[in-house]
Every structure is written in C-alpha cells, then in structure tokens.
Image (cartoon, grey):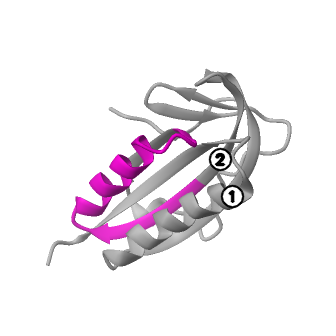
Amino acid sequence: MPANRAYDLVVLIDADAPEERRGSILDGIREQIGSREGNVKNDVEWGVRKLAFEIKHRGDAYYHLFQFEVSGTQVLGELEHNLAIDDAVLRHDALGTDPHHWPDEPAYAVAPGQTAVLYEDDIVVGAGLILAERA
C-alpha cells in the first residue's frame, strides 16, 4: 500500500452561489477524500473575501481550505477534475505539503478586512504571507 501523501486544497467558490450549492460542493470534496480512506486534518471556512482581481467576472469569492492525507494520487485527480468542471468553483489549487508543518489549529485564515490574492499558481494572503508556492 502506498504511503499517505499530504495536500493543501484551497477552493474559491462563487460568492453568489446559494448556500446549499456551496455546501454540496464542500460535502462532495469531503466524500471524495473519505472514499479513498483519506483523512481530513483541517477543514477551514475562510468565508467571503474580496478578490484582488476579477475571476469569471466576479469580484468576491467564498474561500475554503482543506488539509488532508490520502494514499495514492487518484483522489487528487478526481477532485481536480470535478472542481474544474463545476461552474460555481471559480478557482482551486491543490499542493503537496509536509503534514508535520500543519498547525493543530490552522493559522491561515484571512482576517476580516484583508484581501486574499491569487497569482496564477500561488495563493498569497494579506501582506505577503504565502500559503503555498510552486518551485
């Protein structure tokens, strides 16, 4: 059996999407991770935040962070596929990470009044705190 891999997944959902729709997207993510015997370590609602630039003609998005471990990479491909074809998902990014660096309580939440900024493959919060950076 392959060793567990750890991932950070940030999902930006259209702020105008009904709460039921948003809930079904997030529940779907949890179910997909659980179906592969994955373990969600942190599941953090950041709420609606103003975007630094429009995505799909939207100025606000609902942010959600999942930190999870799962064996193999199949679930990641399935998650990315399902999120990519969902019209309510404005952007998502899943990055491999070291679970030893996960805090007991996630410290990534964007404080009210801060703007979360998304640059192509990097997600930056407020005054330069980088959540994840690709090499």
Decide: few, some or many residues near mark 2? Use Cα within 10 Å; few <14, some 14-19, many ≥20: many
User: Which of the two residues, 127 or 83, is positioned nearer the viewer here?
Assistant: 83
Q: Is residue 1 above or below residue 55?
A: below
Residue with the mark numbered 1: 45
Amino acid type at image mark 1 = Glu
Asked if residue 27 lies left or right of residue 116, the reply is left
Q: In the picture, residue 26 is in which quadrant? A: bottom right
User: Which of the two residues, 51 or 84, is positioned nearer the viewer here?
Assistant: 84
Asked if residue 110 lies left or right of residue 39, the reply is right
Q: Is residue 97 above or below residue 89?
A: below
Alpha carbon of mark 2 to alpha carbon of mark 1: how far? 7 Å
Q: Is residue 54 above or below residue 84?
A: above
Image location (x, y in percent) of residue 78: 31, 56
Which label belongs to residue 63? 2
Q: Quadrant of the C terminus?
A: top left
**Magenta part of the protein: which range?**
65-90
Image location (x, y in percent) of residue 133: 43, 36
Q: In the picture, residue 45 is in which quadrant? A: bottom right
SS for tag 1?
A: strand
**Which residue is found at the position 56% from the left and 67% from the top?**
42
Q: Is residue 96 above or below residue 115?
A: below
Image location (x, y in percent) of residue 105: 65, 67
Amino acid type at image mark 2 = Tyr
User: Which of the two residues, 101 or 121, is positioned nearer the viewer here?
Assistant: 121
